[in-house]
Structures are given as structure tokens and as C-alpha cells.
Image: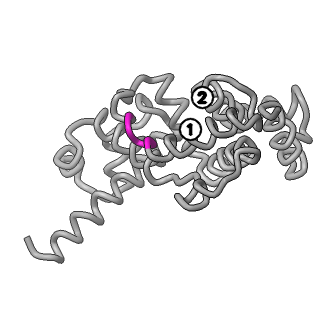
Amino acid sequence: MSRKVQQRAIDTRNRILGAALALFSEHGFSGATMDAVALKANANKQRIYAYFGSKQQLFEAVVLKLFVDVDLFSGNEMAECPPCELSRRLLDGFMKIHAAHPEFWRLLAWSNLDGGVQAGKLVGARTHENTMIRGIFERGVAEGAIRPMSFHNYVYALLALSWFYFSNRRTLKRTLSAELYTAAGRELLIDEASALFSR
């Protein structure tokens, strides 16, 4: 296969993934059709099946790619994070990811609503990052900078807070406070919520 043909195949595959990301995040697994993906990607539907096998495998490829592509921190930045700053950095990082990639929280929601992704596909997607975070967390607990708790519960609480903030912004602006969704309001939320994990 020539280099030109290989590049064309890569470009087509990337167009398909981009189109599928947009459609799945807006309409979910059930609502997005392969015809719509093919039209948006300007690709033959048979080519989509050739690359991905099925609609479910395409959905899984989109979610997995997003998990892999979205970087919370560079390796060096995480390695140098003092334990006393971990909670704030993580919550601020999760918030920034959702702000920059609104399709991320939407795909997470659709994944759980539709069941279009097999959770096993995500195993290992963030293993290296989680290992670094766990090391800093355990050091923080040992040094008395972080409240003792399960690591999984710690990360869960931070992930849940950031996801809920974005996935419920339309209702929370009206039922809780519009101030939450100003730059100052978000900073205050990050400061006060992350302080809950400090000793």
C-alpha cells in the first residue's frame, strides 16, 4: 500500500471518528445512525463497517479515543504536584476538561443511559495517570495533608462534582445559583470543595 493510500485511509478513519463523536455526543448511541455518520464524515457506510465492524464498536472507539486523548496533566506536572495541592489541581483539571470538551460529559452520560459501550473497553485507558495520582494521594494521607479515605471514593467524589456541575448547568443556574456558573463562582466552588479533602 502506498504512503498516499495509507494517509487517505488514516484521514478517512479520523473523519469518521470526528463525525461519530459529534453525533453520538448529541444524540446518543441509539439516536445517531450510521447513515448520519457516513453523511457527516463524507464516507461510504461500508467503509465505516470495514474500519469499525459495527455501530457499537464505533461508539466504543469514539469513547476510548476521547479517554485517551484528553490529558489531565503532563507526566512531569503530575509528578511534581505537592499532596496539599492535589485535590484542587484535580478538581480544577476535571472542570477544565469538561469546559474544553463538552462532548466528554455528554458521552459519559449517553454511555450510561444507552449502554452502548462495554466498560471493559475502558480498562487501562487512564492507568498510568491514576497510578501517579494514587501515589500522591497516599503520600498526602500519610503526611496528614489529605483526609484518610478510600482512593476510589476520593477520585469518585471529585469526578462526580465536576461532571454534575456541567451536566446539570441548565437546571442548577435556576434552582441553586447562577453565580455558580461565573468564573468567580467556579473558582470559589473549586477552592471550597477541594478544601473538604484537606486536614
Q: Neighbour class for label 2 at 10 Å: few (<14), some, many (≥20)?
A: some
Q: Name the residue under label 2.
A: 151
Is there a contact, CB below 8 Å, between mark 2 and mark 1?
yes
Task: Tell me the SS state at disc 1.
Answer: helix
| Labelled disc at residue 121 | none
**Image coordinates for residue 76, horizontal then vertical, percent:** 56, 61
Question: Is there any visible trace of residue 169 in the rendered image?
Answer: no
Three-letter code, disc 1: Arg
Q: How many marks?
A: 2
Three-letter code, disc 2: Phe
**Image coordinates for residue 81, horizontal then vertical, percent:** 66, 53
Image quarter for residue 120?
top left
Asked if residue 5 lies in the magenta stretch, the reply is no
Image quarter for residue 40?
bottom left
Disc 2 to disc 1, C-alpha distance = 7 Å
Q: Give the range drawn in magenta.
A: 123-127
* Residue closest to the eye, 99 or 71: 71
Q: Residue at x 87, y 48 (%)?
A: 182
| Labelled disc at residue 134 | 1
**Image coordinates for residue 189, horizontal then vertical, percent:** 84, 40
